[in-house]
Image: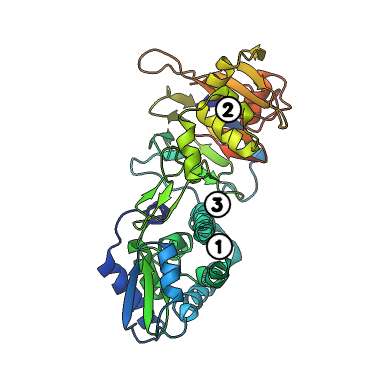
Amino acid sequence: MNDVNTWRGVAAATGAADRAAAERGVRLAYRTAGLAEPERIIWADSPLAGVTAARSLDGGGRSVRDAVRTRPWAAERRRMHDALGPAGWAAHWNTTGARLWDTTRALAERIRGGVLDSLAGKPEEAAELRPVLLDAVLGQHDAAWLAAFDGRSEPLEGLAAVARHAGWWWPYENAVVICERPTALHRDEAGRLDRSDGPALAYPDGFALYAWRGMPVPAEFLDELASLTPERIRGESNAELRRVMLEHYGYDRFLADSGAKPVHRDETGILWRIALADDEDVVTVEVVNSTPEPDGTSRTYWLRVPPTTRTAKEGVAWTFGLSSDAYEPVRQT
Amino acid sequence: MFRQGDVLIMPVAEESVPAGIAEAAGEPRDARGRLILALGEVTGHAHAVTGRGRLIREPGPADGPMLLHLPEGGRVVHEEHAAIPLPRGWFRVVRQREYLPGSVRIVAD
């Protein structure tokens, strides 16, 4: 039995699929569903290539996704729900699938969006591919619910085996289209796609998504980040892109370069405010780490807080969901 | 109330611990037998508690607060911060967050 962290790793796995192991999983899933094993297994280098291959598949027959994936999943869910009871099931889900649900669901959604965006010039094709896209079995990105059933549901072993070794796949009567995993996946601490010097998600055929802290950005935009100036940042009319620019440039550097003045200072830190045209003010608290670095210096960092913040302490307290009065650490390191 | 980097540990009176929490399943310990309050996914550094006790995730969002019960007290450690001894009792563990127009995100150090 694996733990939820193992499945977290499966969801984020990059690098070449283990094709033999994935194909064994596919065949097992078909046999478990009472179906004949597929005659052909076709590999694709990305979900974009996969959806295209699935759409143009010749002689694949009808989709058997319901039989292979949906029905066994629903039956196992019902069985476990009955065995554990509603509260027991909820508690079990909370410690397994729920941990992975938001990040993997968001990632799959971004990939769907990226596939459709890459076909933006061909609206007819996008309209045709959208339902096929929604019909994929998500392989590694099914990690959340597979984590909940791990070690308890023999009928799902085939699906779990594919997920451990490959990406998205489309099961048909006579054929399966199955995708490679990404070659690169970069996320921030909150699990959002995030990379400033290249694609945050990339597949072997070049299909890629660019993002900064979850926000989709054009590839060219990232190139520009290296040469930003405060004037360029102030001049950017798109508020979201301007925020990305500010974060990348650094609040501290921007404060220094624009000659900003501190608004308030107390024992918790310093409050700064930057006024922006046509946008709410950027208000940050400057905090000094209580534990010095190995070289003896203390690291200073900036956290953005709501624009209504009036004092540094109020800002720091807000970062922990507390009012200024309630925030009284007796010891901090 | 104790703070280690981006984690705040607030004492909670035993009588205000929500019903059912005391019996709820606790978080598993890591390979070194520690309770992980917060894990930096990039650095691999963790705010972790050593000693007897349990960590219980409160129902709600995945990054929601957790309750920590230390029947004999304990110690919170981190690779980059000085350790903090904790008295015995119940605590609520809160991750630091940052404001983003329209949303809020969790901070990690």
Estimate the x, y position of residue A140 in percent, counting from the top left. Answer: 41, 61
Which amino acid, mark 3?
A: Ala
Q: Quadrant of the N terminus of chain A?
A: bottom left
Relative to A328, A54 lies left or right: left
Q: Seen from this angle, which residue lies furthest left?
A: A20
Towards the viewer: A257 or A296:
A257
Label 1 resides on the chain identified as: A
Estimate the x, y position of residue A306 in percent, counting from the top left. Answer: 69, 30
Which amino acid, mark 1?
A: Gly
Relative to A50, A87 lies left or right: right
Tell me where residue A155 sits by quadrant.
bottom left
Q: Secondary structure at mark 1?
A: helix
Location of residue A3 with respect to A272 vertically, above or below = below
Q: Which residue is mark 3?
A: B24
Estimate the x, y position of residue A292 in percent, counting from the top left. Answer: 42, 16
Q: CA distance from mark 1 to mark 2?
A: 55 Å
Give the residue at x 55% y 67%: A126
Q: Which residue is mark 1?
A: A88
Q: CA distance from mark 1 to mark 3?
A: 10 Å
Estimate the x, y position of residue A280 in percent, counting from the top left. Answer: 71, 31
Towards the viewer: A53 or A149:
A53
Q: Which mark is residue A232?
A: 2
Give the residue at x 47% y 38%: A222
Label 3 resides on the chain identified as: B
Relative to A318, A154 lies left or right: left
Task: Kindly report which numbered mark, 1 or 2, lies closer to the viewer in this rendering.
Answer: 2
Question: Residues at marks 2 and 3, common chain?
Answer: no
Residue A249 visible to the viewer? yes
Towards the viewer: A134 or B38:
A134
Q: CA distance from mark 2 to mark 3?
A: 53 Å
Binning the other alpha carbons within 10 Å of mark 3 as few (below 14), some (14 to 19) or many (20 upward) gives some
Towards the viewer: A159 or A15:
A15
